[in-house]
Image: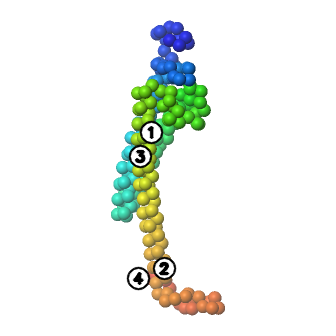
Amino acid sequence: MTGKHDDPGELKAPFFFPETAWSGGGTLDTDMVKTLIEILDNEAAIYEALLKLSHEKTDVIVQGKVTELENITKVEQSMILRLAKLEENREKIVEKLSEEIGMDADSITVTELEKVLPKDQSKELAECQKKLTGIFSDLKNSNDLNARLIKNSLDYINFSVNVLSNVGSPGDIYGKSGQSNDPGKRNFFDVKF
């Protein structure tokens, strides 16, 4: 043991964390690292689901199905709440790990952690990083496309409203004096059917 717990039956609260020596001269809690990897895997799964929803959203935007778009947005919001909880747990674990290796929690990176982890965990962590980076890139591209599609739809709607509100206007509305050229002229929305 490490000297802190001489009784082999005594467990650290709340969990027993096996430790491994690291290059900084101390010990590193490998179960905490496993928990970090599990959290990152769970986050990756949620981001993959968000990516799938983003692709579905593209089709829904193109087809103009507003109700389906609202439903997708509600599902996305619940996933984002789950991500926030996972992220909070990840930050706590990173803070504990950073204390163990003597680094500031805000400046620690996956690359720094990989240097002090056993090879198998270092490899797993690097795979998580690579997977998440790819998902983030794809999600950004999909969200950018969706934003452009929504902007185009709004531009088209604004154009249509402007065209319809100027029905019957052959030219300038105001003359040189600042008065209306045709005070009796009404736009499309003033006409009764």
Query: Which residue does the image show at 56% across and 87% down from the upper left?
Result: 173
Mark closest to the chain's N terminus, 1 or 2: 1
In this rendering, the label closer to the viewer, 1 or 3: 1
Identify the residue under disc 2.
165
Q: Residues within 10 Å of mark 1 (few under 14, many from 20)?
A: some
Task: Identify the amino acid type marked 1.
Answer: Gln
In the displayed structure, would residue 146 be above or below residue 14? Answer: below
Mark closest to the chain's N terminus, 2 or 4: 2
In the displayed structure, would residue 128 be above or below residue 8? Answer: below
Mark 3: secondary structure: helix
Q: CA distance from mark 1 to mark 3?
A: 10 Å
Task: Identify the amino acid type marked 2.
Answer: Ser
Identify the residue under disc 3.
135
Mark closest to the chain's N terminus, 4 or 1: 1
Q: Position of residue 30 (x, y in %)?
A: 46, 24
Query: Which residue does the image show at 45% across and 52% down from the upper left?
Result: 140
**Closer to the camera in the image, 95 or 72:** 95
